[in-house]
Image: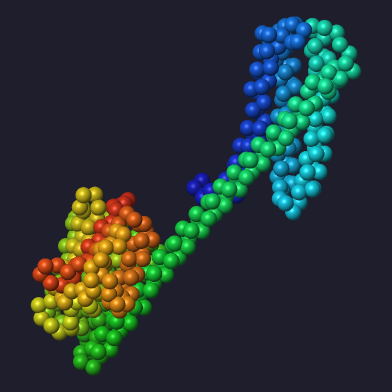
Amino acid sequence: MVALNAPVTFADEGARLRRLTRLLFAVVWVVPAAMAALQRSVVGDASGVHYALGTALVWQGASWMLWGAWSQVVLTLVDRVKLDTARLLPWVAAHLGASAVICATNVFVIAWLDHLFGAVGRVTSYATAVRTVLVDHLDFQVVLYWAVVGAAYMVEFVRRYRERDRAATALEQQLASTQLEALRMQLNPHFLFNALNSVAELMEMDVREAQRTLTRVADLLRLSLRSAGASLIPVWQEIELVELYLQIARVRYGQGLAVDITVDPAAVDDLIPSFLLQPLVENALKHGLAPGHPDQSIEVRVTRDQGALAIVVEDNGKGLDGLLTTSGRFLAVTPSVDGLGIGLTNTRMRLAMLYGDRYAFRMSNPPGGGCRVDIRLPTGTRPAATPYTKAE
């Protein structure tokens, strides 16, 4: 049994388009049949004889609806005889043979209809009707056949183009998703390496604190695995990750590290890339601050600002070493390779892949010293409301 909400595949769409095409090719002949019947009834034939509308509809309807049946044969032939340069001669032979059979049959059938219904106004022999139709209508029947063939192949090419376009789009999305996941997973061993180094240092000084730190590392990995399947997670979930990370970081930086995290209640459930804030905080610790120094601070702010999500990570450390330059939507530092680091490079690549040019990223030196990172993201669909609770 097919599920009601089963996804529509490329094959499903192709089959649906084929059914629609066959239906359209079967009923489109009603239009010329009705016009020809009206002409016979209102204007009359070449001799000026007028026919009753009912008689004209049956006569011309039967003549034209022949193509409703023949078009199904042509569509089947188009499906089975592919048009390509490698098989051009078989393709030409198949359609020449089909056109000869169909057009000859139509001549005899139309002649019989003309003989049958034309006798209402004048007496003609079947042989005369065949000659008349052969002279007057054979070329038109041939043109109709090739017109149907051309229309059928046009629909077939459109169907193939749509399938290839959708397949290419799906492949592009899958590739982007794979690249995003690879970039996100790149952060995990990078962070884990730093965290385990901190634990190793503690093992010689405070075993109990080392155990507590390992527990926090496990909690952080558990939270990161919870969002492993999603490129975007709610702000509150990202804040949980950052606070656990900072608890681990305090092992190295001591209690002299002050942290202030402010989240606008209106932005708590907004979606942001997973592991967006942690690399920014890590960059502030690694490149701006120094372990053991007093009066060091990191401030994280997430607010709604004019329909966008504004994210700020600021420290009071030594600031940027490079020169500020403008590049596209960025105002960023141009340092050495080590200056930008894995975290920030990774973050900018992920933002570009997720948002294109609909975001802004800026690094600057505030007047009071330190480094400030400003990010603006478009706000999107919000998930079900989940209360934000500060990680213990």
In this orientation, does residue 137 appear?
A: yes
Q: In percent of the image, x 57 and y 52: which residue is there? A: 164
* Frontmost residue, 187 versus 143: 143
**Residue 265, image x, y percentages:** 19, 55
* Frontmost residue, 336 versus 14: 336
Q: In percent of the image, x 44 and y 62: which residue is there? A: 176
Toward which corner of the image does residue 315 lie, by quadrant?
Answer: bottom left
Toward which corner of the image does residue 224 lie, by quadrant?
Answer: bottom left
Note whether 316 is above or below 154 in the view shown.
below
Q: Is residue 178 left or right of residue 149?
A: left
Q: In percent of the image, x 20 and y 82: which residue is there? A: 251
Colour scheme: rainbow
Q: How many marks?
A: 0
**Residue 109, image x, y percentages:** 82, 23
Residue at the far bottom in the pictured view: 204
Note whether 5 is above or below 339 in the view shown.
above
Q: Is residue 289 left or right of residue 241?
A: left
Note whether 163 is above or below 117 in the view shown.
below
Q: In percent of the image, x 27 and y 75: which residue is there? A: 335
Toward which corner of the image does residue 23 lie, by quadrant?
Answer: top right
Q: Is residue 179 left or right of residue 146?
A: left
In this orientation, does residue 234 appear?
A: no
**Residue 112, image x, y percentages:** 83, 19
Task: Identify the image quadrant of the C terminus.
Answer: bottom left
* Frontmost residue, 146 versus 207: 146
